[in-house]
Image (cartoon, helix red, strand yellow):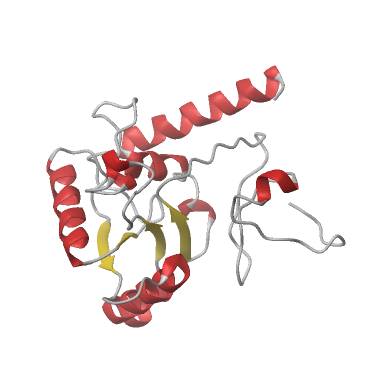
Amino acid sequence: MSQECSTRLQSATREKLRKFDSLRAGEVQPGEFWDVVVLTAGDENQREAYELQIRKKLLRKELPVGVQYKVFADPPGSKIGNGGSTLYALQQLNEVYGKTLCRLRVILIHAGGFSQRLPSASALGKIFTAVPLGDPLYQMLELKLALYVDFPSQMKPGVLVTCADDIELYSTSEDERVKFDKPGFTALGHPSPLSIGTTHGVFVLDSKEKIV
């Protein structure tokens, strides 16, 4: 990465963190932030723990208010993975909001799981893992919301699906915006060699398609 690119990335990330800090404990305005923040949990016990953490965060003024925070547990039985969990959460959202859902901007964060590769996060999951920044101290939940803080104002009503254990940094020029204004699905990705793709989730574009 060039020095210029690195500097731009650092500056853009600092601005996102600053913007999110300005929203913490404040009443967000329509279109300024997500209407609904959804976490998925592996089971009912994890759901209760997540809801307790969110309530405490709101009391400590660590999250924006005027936002609806929801936690949906995966159904009991066999594990359904992120794909099944997404569909199940969308079903739950539809039952809660009905036709209103098509007017909302929703971020859905897959946070459930046993965190077997990170035992220190096994009780509450990676989404409540502390990171060394912010005052009050950030956890992954705040970091994810901060890094995507520009998205709600640049998207039509819909659902953004992400995970709790990845960090995406990006920068744009002054006359560019990351927009989600087209019908259908929009995927975020990073061009990578095959050696990286073999150990990560991937999608392949037709060679004739334009990458934007």
In which image quadrant can residue 56 be found?
top left
Report the front residue among 81 and 34.
81
Tell me: 41 left or right of 2. Answer: left
Q: Tell me the quarter of the image containing the N terminus.
A: top right
Tell me: 110 left or right of 9. Answer: left
Report the front residue among 46 and 31.
46
Residue 150 in the image, given as x and y percentages of width and height: 49, 45
Residue 90 in the image, given as x and y percentages of width and height: 39, 74
Q: In this view, does 30 lie above or below 190?
A: below
**Residue displayed at 67% across by 44% down:** 196
In which image quadrant can residue 186 be found?
bottom right
Residue 74 in the image, given as x and y percentages of width and height: 30, 70
In which image quadrant can residue 91 be found?
bottom left
Q: Is residue 116 above or below residue 107?
A: above
**Residue displayed at 21% across by 54% down:** 50
The residue at the far top in this view is 3
**Residue displayed at 28% across by 43% down:** 121
Tell me: 173 left or right of 23. Answer: right
Residue 6 in the image, given as x and y percentages of width and height: 63, 23
Report the front residue among 102 and 96.
96
Report the front residue among 50 and 154.
50
